[in-house]
Image (cartoon, grey):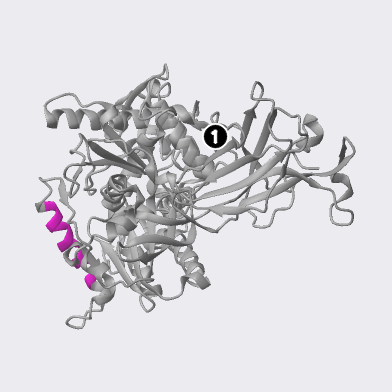
Amino acid sequence: TSAYSSPAKSLGDPGITPLSPSHIVKDSDADDAVEQLFLVVVAIDFGTTSSGYAYSFTKEPECIHVMRRWEGGDPGVSNQKTPTTILLTPERKFHSFGYAARDFYHDLDPTESKHWLYFEKFKMKLHTTGNLTMETDLTAANGKKVKALEIFAYALQFFKEQALKELSDQGGSDFENTEVRWVITVPAIWKQPAKQFMRQAAYKAGMASPENPEQLIIALEPEAASIYCRKLRLHQMIDLSSRAPVNGYSPSDTIGTGFTQGKEHVRRNRQSRTFMVENVIGEIWSELEEGDRYIVVDSGGGTVDMTVHQIRLPEGHLKELYKATGGPYGSLGVDYEFEKLLCKIFGEDFIEQFKIKRPAAWVDLMIAFESRKRAAAPDRTNPLNITLPFSFIDYYKKFRGHSVEHALRKSNVDFVKWSSQGMLRMSPDAMNALFKPTIDQIIQHLSEVFDKPEVTNVKFLFLVGGFAESPLLQQAVQSAFGSRCRVIIPQDVGLTILKGAVLFGLDPAVIKVRRSPLTYGVGVLNRFVEGKHPPEKLLVKDGTRWCTDVFDKFISADQSVALGETVTRSYTPAKPSQLVIVINIYSSEQDNVGFITEPGVKKCGTLRLDLTGTDASVPNRREIKTLMQFGDTEIKAMAVDVATSKSVKVGIDFLNY
């Protein structure tokens, strides 16, 4: 038997049984919901490696403002986002976020710093934890554990306060949270529990509340990118495929230069952090016709996800053609390879100890690597130098009794040398080798997506996200798929998602059709049919023979669902006199589910309809209508007693079962 014992047997609960042939109803009332008026939309791109926010006033939606420049910053890294790092005091109270957290932690004396709780790149935990709950822990740099929900809530609260402060300073009067519609972006490949977790953290941070859930939209990163890409004008992007060889240089040589020109253009206008989004459909979009397909590859620090969209004219609404796929192939993979290389040269035992004993110096080393990582390019010929922190050199000598230089000579890693200025000198090939495993996985995954029947005739491939800034990734994607479609990179590619998320908050209905990530249904009783139903599912109640644990499907994984589409089923209590009706909702990644006891079926919601005290003269067969509304990034369910129109609602919950 499965982890779920049969509810019917265990609860002595007669359960429900289907009443009518099921049908799908388009819910016309969905559009009549009162639209709340927000003065401003603030989108938060909560990234694995860096985060930021942008906003737009609903009165002037064509202006998107990117957050003001914060303190701190790194050499060789010009960006308008801040690192996703958070520092708690030894008493576990919030201290600082971003560069401030990193620099403060770094300046602490090692004897003190081991009591402080420093977290970085913690967003990946939501992706990698199979059974995420409200109780899931995160581990700080010093090995201590804190509830993930608290850390995420602290981070979101920090952004909330920063944004409200900036809005208040700008408007000259205090800005209230109630005037803001918040949008938080998450990877599309996250499972439902992780998306719900983000929402719970935002409630804890005071951005919205269960009573007012509309104030917060959870947007999918590639969808946000896609919305922004529609607005691109030709001068706002780099078309890798249109570069003809110039003066005998191959196109790959010009990739870097075109990118620098693009960057210069942005930098000159850096003082104004306002981006105009013209209220037109960009030129590239005007080449797309009804039914055209394009793929958005969102490559960030932690994950890479891909979504295939199709255009629906006249308004250019988007339809998701193929459910989001991807995996943990973000630029963190490159950092991980660098760490493996260090282990190979200096020994894993040393690196592990160094990270624990000198956590701040380790952070320093990774910052130094980050700026060199951004200098890697396919046509680079001169070596890349990475400064080793003094305490690395010092601690290594104490630990091993010989110098770092000696270790480099002794190791068989011939493309990493020691330079007299106290640096690791890496040949370009050595650096490119660190990128290879991650880039290979991305290309491999993209090839699999391109081979799917739904993905034929893709016209464009938009490469977005922070990792898309890497010329190595650009070249790999262009050479693998340039013959199949045009590869396009928006100019300020790291901010694409942020801007798209703002546009999505201004008009959430722009994505009209999604694919359901899971199969959903409810547990019911059916009349037992000899030979068809397994004998162990037989339950005899008041002389009636029932088959228990039947999974009655509402929607299948990967089925198209329109925004706000409602699926309705009618049930009747198996025992007419029953007054408390419990409907359990289940989900599965499989398409064909017969029974709720099958492996992989998870309970994700309960509707409890209490009809005690209602009029006794109800018909002998009570009709209980059950509705599930799909299409938003969240899913809602409702049960209604038709005779008395008494109803109960529930949001699908993946964290508390």
Give the image location of residue 553, x and y in percent: 65, 51
503 on left or right of 113 = left
Res 185 seen here: no
Residue at image position (56%, 54%) is: 24
Residue at image position (77%, 30%) is: 11
Give the image location of residue 648, x and y in percent: 56, 31
Give the image location of residue 517, x and y in percent: 54, 52
Residue at image position (38%, 38%) is: 362
**Residue 266 lies in the magenta-colored region:** yes
For the stretch drawn in magenta, the main secondary structure is: helix
Give the image location of residue 155, x and y in percent: 36, 31
Where, quadrant-wise, is the C terminus in this rendering? top right
Taking 386 as reference, is 625 above or below it?
above
Q: Nearer the viewer, residue 278 or 110?
A: 278
Please name the amino acid that badge 1 sits on: Val
Q: Quadrant of residue 304?
A: bottom left
124 on left or right of 518 = left
Q: Nearer the viewer, residue 595 or 108?
A: 595
Res 267 seen here: yes
Where, quadrant-wise, is the N terminus in this rendering? top right
| Highlighted range, magenta | 254-267
